[in-house]
Amino acid sequence: MNPLAQQLNETLQKENPHVYDMLSGLGKAIYFPKEGILSQSAEAKSKANKFNATIGIATEGGQPMHLKLIQDTLSSYNPKDIYEYAPPAGKPELRSAWRAKMVKDNPGLQGKSYGNPIVTNALTHGLSIVADLFADAGDAVIIPDKNWENYELTFGVRRGAVIVEYPLYNEETKFNSKGFREALLAQKDKGKAIVVLNFPNNPTGYTPGLQEGLEIVAAIKDAAEAGINVAVVTDDAYFGLFFEDSLQESLFSRLCDLHPRVLAIKVDGATKEEYVWGFRVGFITYASDSQAALAALEQKTMGIIRATISSGPHPSQTFVLHALQSEQFEEQKAEKFAIMKRRANVVKSLLDSGKYGDNLPYYPFNSGYFMCLKLSGVTAEAVRQHLLNEYGIGTIALGETDLRIAFSCIEEIHLEELFDTVNKAVIEVKQAQ
């Protein structure tokens, strides 16, 4: 094993052996090279005041070389903030700005110990880093039965982990805390579990209430006290889009200092929060009461980044930083939130109006981009196909009964027509059977 990896492992073993035990084989072996192109280039950048012939970019006139036709469309930005490589951990100013935003949005983080957010190539990349560092073949990854299909690819196919599902809703159509607890405690013999908490949930648009959130945290603590090392990932892709009386903060705040056997990991990003999907800017943040452990985890994360994408795109990091620093940011974001909330409220009003009879039952939703119908008497796939082929309407079929509809991308004035047509399609599919 490389001495740098061994040094990081020894630090984690000393600071928190439970976190060390959570690491996968790759997680134990990975490190960020201290000696090499990046480190030598960084040294040269600070000391080479005559010629710097280290890193592989081209310069001209004292700034990064660039094409005028590209710069003309980006003239608001200094070439050094878009053309140079970004550091593997991300643009330092952006990391600081996102940390400040996290604290503002999650007051429960005050006084807690957690690392500086590390920039990822959006949320999927953050989740894949978690998988690489902590998931080995056979490890349990606990998610609800209503989930984003990419979890299977990221943790199951790529890393060989076992996906353990529990029903998202209980009989009262609240978060199924009992099922979650049972799935987690069932890993006692393994002594390790990876938990993914995704709120607002994709595909249902559901976020638990405060009491349900406390039950989730209590179940994780009980698992830790039972001897299970738990890596808990809060997938906060749709964070902030809370339209009703639900949790308003990420559970990361409550998990930060929960138990020595619990490693809280926050994966979030500008992707959906700031409506910049194509920018691919996300973040991964670790919690620990040991600064040495946080530094070791950051080094291992940087090692994964260096070994896969080397570093994230610099222009989009600069664009997001510019937005976060703008005086107009909060106002414009509030405007978009209001639009999204109105769309969600219109959808719920339509579905609760009685005009569709029993044709369009739905799972509870209160947040995010989506809602999910729970169809009966027809398959979701048959309705999806009918909507697409007969009416030119696209939806997502999940399993036998569930049809996901993204109200996020439908103008408010078109929502009634959309659901009227979905209702019509369900009736027609039933009649054709």
Image (tube, rainbow, N blue to C red):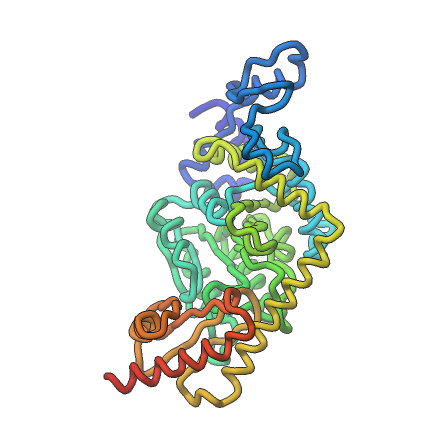
Q: Residue furthest top?
A: 50
Rendered residue at 57%/45% (across/down): 283
Residue 428 percent across, percent down from the top left: 31, 84
Q: Point out the image quarter for the C terminus.
A: bottom left
Residue 150 percent across, percent down from the top left: 40, 54
Residue 15 visible within the image: no
In the image, is residue 247 above or below residue 109?
below
Rendered residue at 53%/73% (across/down): 365
Residue nearest the viewer, comparing 118 with 49:
49
Q: Point out the image quarter for the N terminus.
A: top left
Q: Residue furthest right?
A: 327
Lateral position of residue 284 relative to residue 164, left or right: right
Residue 386 visible within the image: yes
In the image, is residue 50 above or below residue 353?
above
Q: Residue furthest left?
A: 433
> Quadrant of residue 42 in the image?
top right
Residue 60 percent across, percent down from the top left: 59, 19
Q: How many tags in the picture?
A: 0
Residue nearest the viewer, comparing 431 with 32:
431
Residue 351 percent across, percent down from the top left: 50, 82
Rendered residue at 45%/72% (across/down): 372
Lateral position of residue 77 relative to residue 88, left or right: right
